[in-house]
Amino acid sequence: MELMNIEVQARSLIAKAIDAEKCLTSVEIREKMKGKILITCEDYLTARAKMCEIVSQINQIANYCGRGRDDLDHSILLETEGLLRRITKDQSKAIRILGEKIRCSFVNLRGLFRKYDKNIEMVDPQLKNNSDLVEALMEYERSWEKGATYFCDSEKRRHLLHFSGTIESMSEKYDKFKEMVECSDADIFLIIPCILTLKSLDKDDKNLCKYFLPTLHQIDTKTFRMYF
């Protein structure tokens, strides 16, 4: 009985995640039946935020292959969804791919908790020993870290939108450029800065060059004399 109690305590976070997932599913079903838009429903957002909080706690304990971050909160998912609603499929494929990865990683974890709910005894009390959980958490952390970096910071978000849009538009116009990007050709890492520098001269780089290379606009620097 003592050993069983220890195992129950060890699985307590998984049990909380299962309960949170059930609560979230219940709210989704209820609000959809009312014809409400989930993203504007306070109960839905509260339930999902709670789910994110528990997942972060589990990530801290079980994700030994990653960094075990516990600060990947609900705001990242909110920013991701907001961005995906604002941009079209043609504006930035890279942004949409990252956004979908963030959403999918959360959905996959919810599916895993539903699976565990059928038989929680299948979960190893040493959470890091559950390979399916660790794999799902690794993907969750990788994608959400990028979301925290690029989606939650308004300036970086604006830069990423402009940069990815520039690269994608160039790829559509020039097949050779597209091939170099897809193959990560070494020359592309020289070509892209040149393109952004030219755009900076036309004041069409959204201050990307100034952000990453401040000396470009400082008159008394070697960089300024070289380009201007």
Image (tube, helix red, strand yellow):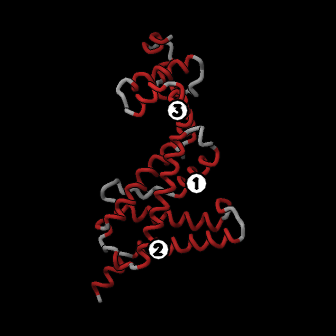
In the depicted view, which residue is nearer to us: 135 or 141? 135
- Reply above or below: 193 against 79: above
Determine which quarter of the picture holds residue 129: bottom left
Secondary structure type for disc 1: helix
> Label 1 belongs to which residue?
78
Q: Residue furthest front?
A: 175
Which amino acid type is shown beneath numbered disc 1?
A: Leu
Residue 38 shown left or right of residue 170 in the figure: right
Instruction: Tell me how many marks there are.
Output: 3
- Write the residue at 41% across / 72% down: 14
Q: Quadrant of the N terminus?
A: bottom left
Dot placed on the residue nearer the N-terminal end, 1 or 2 = 2
Measure how far apart labels 1 and 2 are at the Cα level: 22 Å
User: x, y (%) of residue 61?
Assistant: 35, 64
> Label 3 belongs to which residue?
168
- Write the residue at 37% across / 32% down: 184
> Label 2 belongs to which residue?
18
Which amino acid type is shown beneath numbered disc 2?
A: Ile
In the depicted view, which residue is nearer to us: 197 or 72? 197
In the depicted view, which residue is nearer to us: 41 or 104? 104
Between marks 3 and 2 in the image, the one whose residue lies nearer the viewer = 3
User: x, y (%) of residue 191?
Assistant: 43, 22
Q: Residue furthest right?
A: 35
Disc 1 crowd, CA 10 A, few/some/many (<14, 14-19, 20+)? some
Between marks 1 and 3 in the image, the one whose residue lies nearer the viewer = 3
Secondary structure type for disc 3: helix
Measure how far apart labels 3 and 2 are at the Cα level: 41 Å
In the depicted view, which residue is nearer to us: 91 or 14? 91
Q: Are marks 1 and 2 in contact (CB under 8 Å)?
A: no
